[in-house]
Image: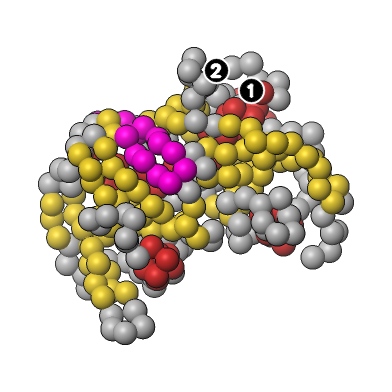
Amino acid sequence: MQIRFTKMQGAGNDFVVLDETQGRLGLTPAHYRYLADRHFGVGADQILTVRRPTADATAQGIDFEYVIHNADGGEVEQCGNGSRCFARYVRDKGLTDKDTIRVQTLSGVIAPRLTPDGRVTVDMGRPVLEPARVPFDTTGLQPVAQGSGQKWPLTLDLPAQPATVLVAVVSMGNPHAVQLVEDVDTAPVAIWGPLVERHVRFPQRVNAGFMQVVSRSHVRLRVFERGTGETLACGTGACAAVAAGIRLGLLDNEVHVDMRGGRLTIAWTGQDTDTLYMTGPATTVFEGQIDIPDHL
């Protein structure tokens, strides 16, 4: 089957965007894996699909449905950098003339807004910090209190001998485990990342974040993403890291997050009742058409 696509990126986190507003393409997990493959397909960290909302959702003011598949073909709840690209795509393609849209995701409703400087600000909702809702199994664990937050011990099964790291657990619609490191450049992301991602205490697996605090308004971050591996940037990972840092008393309410693909700005009051905002770039790289085998 032949499929038209748009390749986009947000701070180096890259996506294949598909338009299903006129009808479903009928893709399987194997098709999504093929599209994401950097040798045989287009190549992407995630596949983003644009759909029209249901009649009930439209009546509630929802403009679009946003579906996300990781490079391993699995559907996931949320993608922050992708949400900015989603907003840029629907506006550039003439699917909406609004500056702010309401978008239904698997985990809830988000509201991306195009700003005059070309960036996109997204209302990412309220960070979830209760371990059971992340979800994270705390059975038998004793948290370490810091500020108004807490860090949890996590034992990693390393080849030489087990090691215990402290993680702050946060959900931004998808699960994150954030650990503090002295230097992100030397952090063992490739080794510890997959061990955290698939740790038995995270029943839905988890995105593993490694955060270096430079100042109260500036952090550096690397993220080993669930189902994808390390990416150049992770929007929800940046949101989760800043939320954790604010609660741990390490960060102010507006923070610049530098990742290998670029900078995002995260703003949150630290209050449970307030939503968190993410601002960053969203860029179209190229458009094309690909012939995908019907049966994979």
The answer to whether residue 89 is left or right of residue 112 is right
Q: Is residue 30 magenta?
A: no
The answer to whether residue 166 is left or right of residue 263 is left
Viewer-side residue, 289 vs 207: 289
Q: Which residue is mark 1?
A: 91
Question: Mark 1 Cα within 10 Å, few/some/many (few <14, many 20+)?
Answer: some
The circle drawn on residue 219 is none
Per the rendered image, the range of residues in magenta is 256-274
Q: Position of residue 255 (x, y in %)?
A: 29, 34
Tell me: residue 149, above or below residue 118.
below
Q: Is residue 259 magenta?
A: yes
Say which amino acid is labelled 1: Arg
Q: Which residue is mark 2?
A: 99
Which residue is found at the position 13% from the left and 52% from the top? 146
Q: Residue furthest bottom?
A: 160
Say which amino acid is labelled 2: Asp
Viewer-side residue, 122 vs 256: 256
Question: Mark 2 Cα within 10 Å, few/some/many (few <14, many 20+)?
Answer: some
Viewer-side residue, 184 vs 104: 184
Tag 1 secondary structure: helix
The answer to whether residue 144 is left or right of residue 220 is left
Tell me: residue 240, above or below residue 31.
above
Q: Position of residue 55 (x, y in %)?
A: 67, 31
1 or 2: tag closer to the N-terminus: 1
Tell me: residue 15, above or below residue 88.
below
